[in-house]
Image: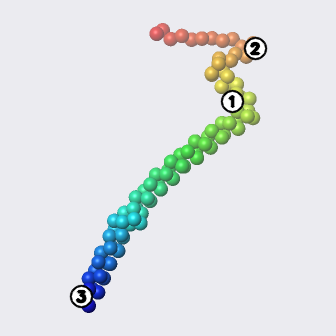
Amino acid sequence: MKWLLGILVVLLCALQYRLWIGEGSLAQANRLDQELKVQQAENDRLLERNRLIHVEVEDLKTGLDTIEERARKDIGLIKKDETFYMLLDEQ
């Protein structure tokens, strides 16, 4: 009978170890939940960035105003019959 009680105590300790410390433990589950929340926040941020890029691409494909704005800003486009004025700082 003593050996049965000893086996049960050892079995109980082994199960408690696995519950609190081992693989699949509560601590590991909490850590994975935190990692999941961080990853979901990152995914949401990237989805929003992708949405903005998609909107910009669609606008560039269909709208001439955006293309003209980019050309004016990036390469200094000046239309016919426009006068270009350059203002310089005193520095």
Q: Residues within 10 Å of mark 2 (few under 14, many from 20)?
A: few
> Which residue occupies the foreground of this view, 28 or 50?
28
Image position, residue 22 (x, y; %): 36, 66
Say which element carries label 1. helix
> Which residue occupies the foreground of this view, 38 or 4?
4
Q: Is residue 31 above or below residue 44?
A: below
Q: Is residue 57 above or below residue 22?
A: above
Mark nearer the viewer, 3 or 2: 3
Query: Is 65 on the left-hand or right-hand side of 44?
Result: right
Please tell me which of labels 2 and 1 falls first in the chain.
1
> Which residue occupies the foreground of this view, 16 or 77?
16
Name the residue carrying label 2. Answer: 80
Image position, residue 71 (x, y; %): 67, 22
Q: CA distance from mark 3 to mark 2?
A: 102 Å
Q: Quadrant of the N terminus?
A: bottom left
Q: CA distance from mark 2 to mark 1?
A: 18 Å
Please tell me which of labels 1 and 3 falls first in the chain.
3
Image position, residue 86 (x, y; %): 60, 11
Amino acid type, label 1: Thr
Mark nearer the viewer, 1 or 3: 3
Amino acid type, label 3: Lys
Query: Is 81 on the left-hand or right-hand side of 55?
Result: right
Please tell me which of labels 3 and 2 falls first in the chain.
3
Name the residue carrying label 1. Answer: 66
Q: CA distance from mark 1 to mark 3?
A: 85 Å
Q: Is residue 46 above or below residue 61?
A: below
Quarter residue 13 falls in = bottom left
Amino acid type, label 2: Lys
Say which element carries label 3. helix
Say which element carries label 2. loop
Query: Is 74 on the left-hand or right-hand side of 3?
Result: right
